[in-house]
Amino acid sequence: MRPLLRPTQHFTLKLLTRTSSRTTFVFPMVKRKSDTLGDNSSIQRPSQIRKMATQPATTTIELTPRESQLKDLLSDAAKFIDGTGKVQEPIVLRWAGGWVRDKLLGVGSHDIDTAINVMTGETFAINLCQLCEQPDTIKKHAITESDIGNIHKIARNPEKSKHLETTTIKLFGYDVDFVNLRKETYSEDSRNPQMEFGTAEEDALRRDATVNALFYNLNTGKVEDFTTGLIDMKSKLIRTPLEPFQTFMDDPLRVLRLVRFASRLEFTIDSAVEKVMGDHQVLDALRLKISRERVGVEVEKMLKGNHPRRSLEYIDRLGLYHTIFTDPSSADLPTPDISNWNLAYELLDYLRQSKTPGSIYDVLVRSEEAAYYAWVLAALCPWESVEPLPTARPAKGKPPPPFATRAAREGIKANNKLCDLTTAAHNNKKEITVIVRAIEESAPYTKERDTLGMAIRRWDSKAGHWRVQVLYALLTEATKALATGSVSKDEFLRPWQSCLDHLQELGAMDAPSLKRIIDGTQLAKALGVKPGKWMAEALEVCVAWQLRNPDVTDPAGAIEEVRNRRAELKIPEK
């Protein structure tokens, strides 16, 4: 057995950033029971480190000129407050969490969390703004009118596991949050913590992941690691500073946050942490204790990130689906079969990765918004396998929304636009699939530009994004077709690609944006009648005529078409 290093000795690790520059991590030796660092289980556990560490591990990072400008201003603000005698010990400011992590990875960030040792964030921010009004400060730090924004306060909501009260100011283009260092204490009859001033180490230990528990000390200019954050950065590992079950029960939203971080950073979640993330007590707490708005925010960040497939894979593998994409207020909501769900999100990622001009993804996903909607709909695909309840449709009135829409609206608090799109995608799925098959079989009506063009206009009329609706139909069909193994992925995709090629050749793709050759006022005048309920349908007849006659600019033919169908359209006589 090799001897342990003396406490005064150091060892170094080097991390390659995305810019190929090197950052050297210098760790003071921490006493440990084991003298080896092998798999995850042999790395020193955070609870042990808390008891045995004599000082934090450190490293340094290089600031940009703008970051240095912000650092100098905040440091002067701390000195300014120290000089007023309002605090009993000197203020120490630390930039915390995500900014430090991303900086070590060579990734820029405009969000900076600033932790304060002896003062609330609101009090510090107020004093900072007072300092920034002084002419000497404005001159010293080259402050312009747009450099200092207004103070915004975000209240805590412990019942929804929003334990922190933060104050935010826009400074030099950065969104800077101010909050005091904290520790959490719990009573026996409540899981809502009492937030108290704490040390930097105590604050680090209450965070969601070790890689998010790093500090940059503005006084020393060094990164401080009170857990195993720097080691885990090197190992690309997501772990919790404290025991995982306690971490997640304190704030169950951390389950989704760790999924998001692991996906975004392309890190691996520690196996012991993964096991707890799927614990039924943790999932029950996530479903019932956390506001669905906060759940929706995390899911949106995942699916708008660079690795949405990876996020859905984690949700699938860890058994989180039925906790996220559901209506937690409805006990009678059925449970969708997700055994083949992976086929949907894997296929979407395959289409994205193999995008070429004119390919399925290139044609159907034409904006960042459409890409996000596509991933949400891919997440909702399993609901298409659930049969509507026999009593779901009322005798009169509007039918209830599809299960997928309920999961979007209540599970992740999707906005009305996305919910409407989900409903439209569900309602139009069957017709879309029928047309794809008809084109594959060369059915005569598929040669009619107006027939296909008007179908596309119908799909687009209620919620827009008809192309994403086609993609939803494709993905839901894929979960059935590919599950049997009777067709390959390329064989399944071939008729869908042929359908899009055919619509392109037919000139029907832009049917929803077709400008009418005649408006309602002109049509009523030409017919010699007053506008009425008949108008909407008559104008659609005009659009269909346009689609059949794309090169004609005179509306006379469209008017005549309407006149010949006067009785059918219930247009009154003159």
Image (cartoon, helix red, strand yellow):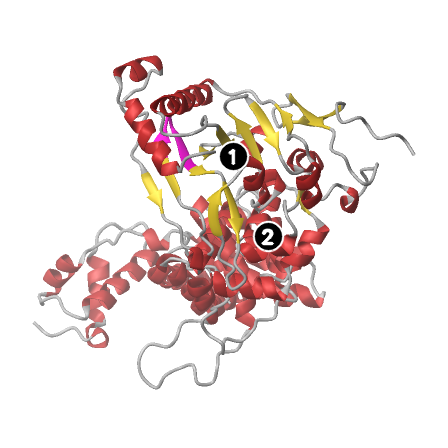
* Res 76 quadrant in image: top left
**Secondary structure, magenta segment, majority class:** strand
| Residue 140 rendering spot, x and y as whole percentages | 34, 13
| Residue 203 rendering spot, x and y as whole percentages | 54, 41
Q: Looking at the image, which is closer to me, 453 or 140?
A: 140
| Residue 171 on the magenta segment | yes
Would you name the residue on which mark 1 appears? 96
Vertical arrangement, residue 273 with respect to residue 93, above or below:
below
The crowding category of the residue bearing disc 2, from other C-alpha atoms within 10 Å (few below 14, some 14 to 19, many at least 20), is: many
Would you say 490 lies left or right of 121 here? right
Quarter of the figure with the C terminus = bottom left
Circle nearer the N terminus (1, 2): 1
Q: SS class of the residue under badge 1? A: strand
* Res 249 quadrant in image: bottom right
Amino acid beneath label 1 = Ala
> Residue 247 bears which disc, if any?
2
User: In percent of the image, x 84 and y 30: which residue is there?
Assistant: 4
The crowding category of the residue bearing disc 1, from other C-alpha atoms within 10 Å (few below 14, some 14 to 19, many at least 20), is: many
Per the rendered image, the range of residues in magenta is: 169-178
